[in-house]
Amino acid sequence: MSVDTADSGRNGVFTPFNLISGAILLGGAIILTIRFTTGLASTTNLSDTNPWGLWIGFDVMAGVALAAGGFVISSAVFLFGMKEYQSVVRPALLTGFLGYSLVVIGLLADLGRPWRLPYPFIKQAGPTSPLFEVSLCVALYLTVLFIETTPAIFEWLGLKWWRRLVAQLTIVLTIFGLILSTMHQSTLGAMFMVTPTKLHPLWYSPHIPVQFFISAIAAGISMIIVEGWFSHRVFHHQVQISDDQFHDINFGLAKGGAVVLVTYLAVKVVALSLENEWRLLATGWGAWYLVELIGFVVAPCILFAVAYRERRLGLARMAAAMTVLGVILNRFNATFIAFNWQVPHEMRYVPAWTEVWVTVSLITFAVVVFRWIANRMPIMYEHPDYPALH
Amino acid sequence: MSMSRRGFVGSLAVGAGAFSSGAADAGTIEHFEGYPDRYGLLHDTTLCVGCRSCEVACAEVNALPKPRQPVGDLDVFETVRRTRATAFTVVNRYQDGDDGNPPVYRKLQCMHCNEPCCAAVCLVHAFTKTPEGPVLYDPEVCIGCRYCIMACPYYALSYEYDNPIDPQVMRCTMCYPRIKEGLNPGCADACPAGAITFGRREDLLKVARDRIRKFPERYINHVFGEYEFGGTSWLMLAGVPFRELDLHEGVTHESLPAIGTSYLSVVPLIVTIYPGLLAAFYAFTKRKDKLAKRELEAALAEARTRGEEEMKAKLSNAAERAKKDKEKAVEVAVRKALAEQGEGGPS
């Protein structure tokens, strides 16, 4: 019998997976210790000109978008009656919950005085700030995601009464989650509306909130495909649905991905036309913009469509991975690549290796926790004592 | 201030009372001209000789370390510098004067905007525009997100990145404590060339326009800071286009908060419209399911009744046939019996 990764976790402590992830996490812990004892300057390349770097660009901006799968799939299943996706709701919600937890941890590393995180709510509110709205929504949505994850915990612990209570809240929680997600996913984009002179005009747009929201949906759908790609292999012994059902789910998601990406492309083109920025496409920044738009929006969109028509799982996964990378690239552009585009070369921001290490540590941490939970709680399968909610 | 009417999330949070006043506010088309009699500073770049006395005075007044490069060290102008956590103002040279024209210097510092973007985007409201003109920062509430530094269009804010305990956003305060004492800001007092004038902003605008009128060949006909992004406390005169001084010339007169935080007014609509809209979607899917179920039941019922009728018909047919068969059999039997009787009967 072949030893798969999920089992090896229980067979011993010194497995390759544990050793590698342990080394990454240890390194991250050391770097964060240095950061909290000597300040941000020692571990980041942040500067007065570039106050936001990788920790905001990836951990917060991209992290929130990539964790959108939870609200997308729970809305589809519970509000729009697409029950065939029921089996991916729990992994998507867990991914979402862990994703948002990472956003908060990443933010704590980046804030100058992280212990003051609750200040906007307990000390002094700044309701004119888009960031105030984002923090309020993220705080509430993290709570919603946690409650939405608890059925698995209650089933694991055998707390039937609690499990039934949360099941009754499903619709309310789903609607609340969709409202909060629409709000903060778009407002994260709105945060850049105050920087018309700093963000390159190809990326700056009055429509940037809508662009952020739609691309977050694409990222969420793609992350479900990517997450299923790995967990279907790692947790194969737990998966109850047939391979046919699993394929149908992936091709349904691929179709959804194609539609969302086509919508996103249309929204981007509308912005270009409204602001009449076509001539900028002929510049160097225009070429970089086209790399993002054609390489990571148009191309995965076509791949998704072909994957759906010809039922090719490999293509769907490739398109999903490209979409995820594209959304990350878009958030990087907004935060530090196309941002400060007029600043002299020597004052531009490039992440320090320590920043990259901490970000990789956070992702590793999420994978380890996901694995720990999925190995114990009914995430990949339905608990025999608790049939489907609907 | 006009940005305060954009605090929709906040007004939702405090409830109906705030909502009514907020609504009245949001409906207004009145324009806030800014606090009357507020102070400002005029920097006439055509008078600036690049002596950096202002840098030295600023450091002294604010108890900051002396400028890294001593005054008189002309190498300092070889690179474009920006303000730092330990230097609230720096003077840069933008034209070196090799082409026969005099060199052009510009002093950089916080512009003290009329409608400061740093204040609008701060999630703990750490910045305040004072009636006197300076924009003040309160380190007691700052959480260190640095959104203000991102938002500032003049790259005027700095941060103490090397402080792990209580890092602060650092910037020019327009010497607010000195103004309160009736003194001039440190840089204005120190300038030996008369390139920095302190006074009421309205008066400074008159001074600036007077100079342009009297010396049209010396100045370009534009006072930078009068209207740019809603206007600033610092005003500038120059003999060269401002874009050559790394400034965004000809930008909109609308303030950055007005441009950039307008989206927040959409947010309450999401909260108000989504529940009903989503409940409707949910009802649609439920209704579709219900209709489908009802149709299925009707079809089943019909099939059942039709089946029953058919069965009944079949049964009655069969019964009739059986009856007929029976009658026939009886008839046959009777006939047979009669025949037998006829054969063997008495004759």
Image (tube, grey):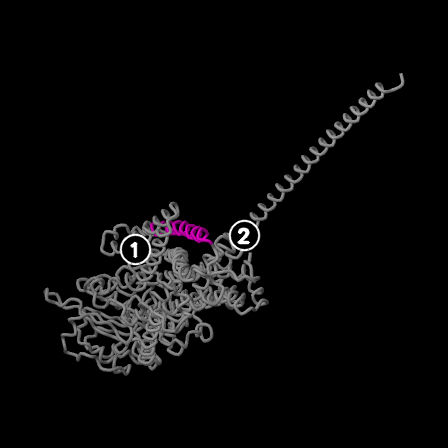
**SS at circle 2:** helix
- Given residues B183 and B259, the one toward you in this image is B259
> Amino acid type of disc 2?
Ala
Q: Quadrant of the C terminus of chain A?
A: bottom right
Question: Same chain for marks 2 and 1?
Answer: no
Rendering quarter of residue A128: bottom left
Q: Which of the chains bears the disc numbered 1?
A: A
Residue A47 in sight here: no
Marks 2 and 1, Cα distance to the nearest angstrom? 37 Å
> How far across and how far down the image is residue A185, in percent?
41, 61
Magenta span: A242-269
The residue singled out by tag 2 in the image is B280
> How far across and how far down the image is residue A192, in percent?
35, 62
Q: Which mark is residue A292?
A: 1
Q: Which of the chains bears the disc numbered 2?
A: B
Q: Residue at x 62, y 42 (%)?
A: B300
Toward the top, the furthest residue is B347
Rendering quarter of residue A333: bottom left
Would residue A257 be counted in the magenta stretch? yes
- Given residues B269 and B202, the one toward you in this image is B269
Q: Choose mark 2 or mark 1, whichever is in front.
A: 1
Q: Quadrant of the N terminus of chain A?
A: bottom left
**SS at circle 1:** helix
Mark 1 crowd level (few <14, some 14–19, many ≥20, 10 Å Cα):
some
